Structure formats: C-alpha cells, structure tokens
Amino acid sequence: MRRTVAMIAVIAVAAVSCSANTEDRVVVAAGTTLVDSGFLPSVVERFEASHPDIAVSVVGLSSAEAFAYGSTGTADVLITHDPAGLATFLDDHPDATTTVVFSSEFLLAAPSGWTFDDESVVDAFRSIATQRREFVSRDDRSGTNVRELTIWSEAGIDPLDEPWYTRTGSGMVSTLLIADERDAATLAERGAFLAASDALNLVEYPLERDDLLDNPYDVTVASESSGGDEFASWLVDRDGREAITVANEALFGSEVYRLP
C-alpha cells in the first residue's frame, strides 16, 4: 500500500510528460507537494486537453531546486511556495513575471497518542523539543522545509544537531512515510498529507489558526516561452480556476488548494 502511494506522483508525471509530439513543450518545475498530491498533474491534464499544440512536462522539485532550474533556463515556469527564495530569484531575474495562483496550508502530522498543553504551532514545536519527541524533517530546501525552520526559529530552538531530529533529504510523501514508521512528527502540506493518508497512522495534530501555517503558491514565468506564458495565464484565468476547482473536488472532496 505504501509503495503504491509513493508511486502515484511518478506515474502522474510520466503521464503528463509523455504527450504526443506537439509544436511547443513547456517545462514546469513545481514543488513536490503539488506533484505528490496528484493535484498539479490533474490540472495540467485539463490544460493539455484544451491546448493540443502545447505539451507540459512537470518536474517535481524542492523550491530551491525549482529556482535553480529557472536560473539555468531548464524550466520555463516555476510553481513554488518559498516567498523569500522567490524574492531572491526575482532580484536576479527582473524580466520574470509572477503571481499568487492558489494557497494551501501546513499541518503538524503526529502519532495519534501525542498530546501537548498548547494549541499554537510554535508552542507545539517547543513542546516536541522539550519532551524530546522525534521529529522528521524534509531537509531539502523545499518551501515546507523553509517554513519548518522558520517555526523552529520562532520557538527559539535550533534542532539541527539534536538526536531526536531526523533529516530525510526527501520529498513530502517519503518524509511522511518515514515519520510514520518512526512514530514521529513532521510538518506536512495538507494536499500531500491527504493523498498519503490511507498509508499512514499519523493524524493531524489540532492547532489553532496561525499565519505560519498559511502556504501560498506562486506561478512564475522564468524564461521567454510562448507556451509558458500561455500556461501561466491560463492558470489564473477562468478556465484554469475551473480546473483547480475540479481537481480539488475529484481528489479531496473539498477546497484544499484555495483560489485567491
């Protein structure tokens, strides 16, 4: 069962990337959370159906890797959730254009028996450190990893050399599965968590609403590409918004990736 979940993103990306020969191919470097959840491949499928002359190849990467792909011209379009990293990228590439396309949220996934005397994510992280509960980090410079480190900083804790802090260097689903096997907690993006939930014993730990859990995604056209411009414009226009709504309903039965 776990192997099946872990292979979903690979199969989805292969399907998206193997379209028939067309006039224009667009490479989209996107956060692994969007690929692992199946959400972006579903949206791209609808784009290709209405744009037969454009094929989209989706590459699931950390946000840092996506920016690197954009910098070298390897990717035409970036979909990332690392605002600080994006700001640096835009400083270095003033011709790039960007806009917020949708947002989701982060959650704390933890064993069902865990309890803390707090409700905020900062206090929960502080309690994990105080009680030396195991925490599994992606440690891959993804948007999720950047946000996790921000929360640790807000809690006044540097966990990097602690024995209870495990670093995977992997994507969201792999990290969730490792945390599940180790009865540990991890910070997860909601869509990827829901996609993997049937293979997990971990549950969402209840936390109060917090801006630190907000997770906006930006779509950035990184290089001159008529197909890239078309795809990015479509995403934020009526048809793209409809595709986002349909993908949410089909995959999750609710609006996990929220429109602005």
Image (cartoon, rainbow, N blue to C red):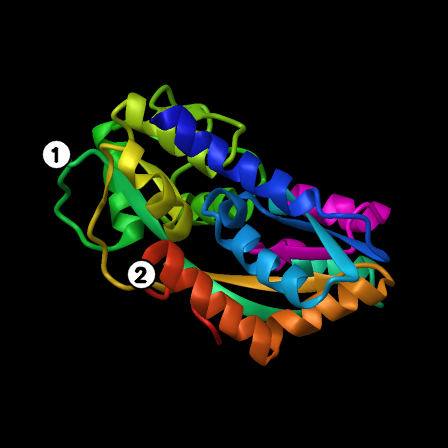
Q: Mark 2 points at which residue?
A: 253
- Disc 1: CA contacts within 10 A as few (<14), some (14-19) or many (>=20): few
- Residue placed under numbered mark 1 in the picture: 113
Is 152 situated left or right of 47 in this image?
left
Disc 1 versus disc 2: nearer the observer = 2
Coordinates of residue 158 in the picture (x, y in percent):
43, 35
Residue at disc 1, secondary structure: loop
Q: In this view, does 233 lie above or below 70?
A: below
- Span colored in magenta: 64-85
> Quick one: which residue is furthest to the bottom in this view?
238
Residues 91 and 47: in front is 47
Task: Give the residue type that dot 2 points to.
Answer: Gly
Q: Which of marks 1 and 2 is nearer the N terminus?
A: 1
Where does residue 191 sit, x and y in percent of width and height?
A: 40, 51
In this picture, is 80 found above or below 149? below
- Residue at the spot x=40%, y=33% of the render? 5
- Residue closest to the eye, 74 or 188: 74
